[in-house]
Image (spheres, grey):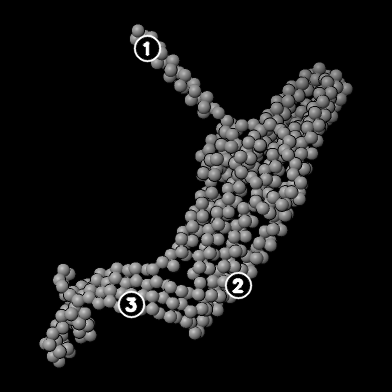
Amino acid sequence: MKHRISTAVWFVLLCATAATGAAAQQPLTLRQAIAEALGANPEARQAEAATREASAQATLARTALLPQLNFTEDISRGDDPVYAFGSRLRQQAFTQADFALNALNKPQPIGNFATRLSGQWLAFDSFQTQKRIRAAGQMQKSAAFSAQAANQKIVLDVVSAYQAVLYAERRVAVAQQELETAQALLASVDDHVQAGLAVESDRMSAEVNMATRQQEQIAAEGNLEIAWAQLRVAMGAPELPETALAPIAPHSFPPMALDAALQTAYKTRPDLAAVDQAQSAEAAALSAAKLGFGPRISAYGNWEQDRPTFAGAGGNNWVAGVQLTLDIAPIAKRAQLADARAARDRIDAQRASYRQQVQLQVTEAEIALRTAELSVATAEAARAQSAESLRILRNRYGAGLATITDLLRAEDAERASQNNYWQAVYGNAVAYAQLLFATGTLSPDAAEELQ
């Protein structure tokens, strides 16, 4: 019975280990890479912090409409004549003896415990505070749109880096295949030379060809390491191991007319929306600067209790009032107004520049996608033709009907056609992602279309 239980336990552990190993070998999908990047990339955290900062500033601007209340507990002691006279008076402990000249000129040290409650409220400032609140609220919206733009840029970077790793892996595979082919060719040439069917120069050409293929493999492996480094940076995961990536099958993407793409971009680009909100905020800030020349009305109040000891009895008093303030020499406010005008003009020019950049980016992305789609079809046909040409030349060389130069030239063409094909395939996916980014519609869900 114990043996059966032990066997069952080992079977369960073996299944669990196998399941764990299978889970560990699951390839990293593009969607998973994007999700991790949006949570770990420093640029995403920076954008999120900027959003919280703008929210806090908007809340701070609204507090200007609230009354300010302060509590103060003051403990003092001294023999200054004015201080002593005032403290006794506020303590309501003044006596006839305190009017003696000696007591007035040289009073004994006196202590005072003062408890104060004071408040201020800005009742009216020509609506300047309301304009500042509006400007802060629009800057908060601008920060939120900027965060969306940062996230879209992260998604694009991950897509590009992910595709770069896949392409680099294909290049390594092609380089390895070509190196094996070069080794086989060198062995075949050796046989031909020993049989008198080829000359020594053919062997030298085959050796040079194999050395070249070795260099290409080394370069391809180096490019793969660089691509992985770029993916780690894009994902914000510096310790990410070189695991397997989910392959992306070659496929076409839905076309998008240039005019429709431009209209979509003007409506949905988050960075353009951020500039629009910033423009409105600067306009509100300019209005606030103009209203700063108007009058201000504030109310204030103060209640105070003074005692000779902390827990003793004493006197209390209060005062309240309303204050009207008008700046009759607003030199600083004129400078603030000039600064606000310059900021408004700057954001207007920035918005115009952004719209031009959006138009250029959408145009370039739309053309790049159309070009990439055509490149895939052309590269696929060229790959098939070069493979067939290489097959024919290998047979001809084996029959002594072609030179090694012809064979090496055909191998170069076949290798280049393979690299061009995979570059076109992955470049097509990146071009589609760039078009989505240019139109402001790139999201983590786009990975479903690209995978």
Near-viewer residue (128 or 245): 128
Q: Which residue is mark 2?
A: 341
Work out which quarter of the rendered image holds the N terminus and state it. Answer: top left
Distance (Cα) linking label 1 and label 3: 87 Å
Amino acid type at image mark 3: Ala
User: First in sequence: mark 1 or mark 3?
Assistant: 1
Check disc 3 and report its element: helix, strand or loop.
strand
**Depicted 391 relative to depicted 241: above or below:** above
Q: Position of residue 133 (x, y in %)?
A: 50, 65
Instruction: Answer left or right for 89 relative to 175.
Output: left
The circle drawn on residue 320 is 3
User: First in sequence: mark 2 or mark 3?
Assistant: 3
Near-viewer residue (45 or 122): 122
Amino acid type at image mark 1: Ile
Q: Residue at coordinates 70% horizontally, 27% vertically from top-left? A: 177
Report crowding for label 1: few under 14, some 14 to 19, many 20 or more residues within 10 A (C-alpha).
few
Amino acid type at image mark 2: Arg
Can residue 207 be seen by looking at this rendering?
Answer: yes
The circle drawn on residue 5 is 1
Q: Position of residue 380 (x, y in %)?
A: 78, 32
Is the residue under label 2 in contact with that under label 1 (CB below 8 Å)? no
User: First in sequence: mark 1 or mark 2?
Assistant: 1
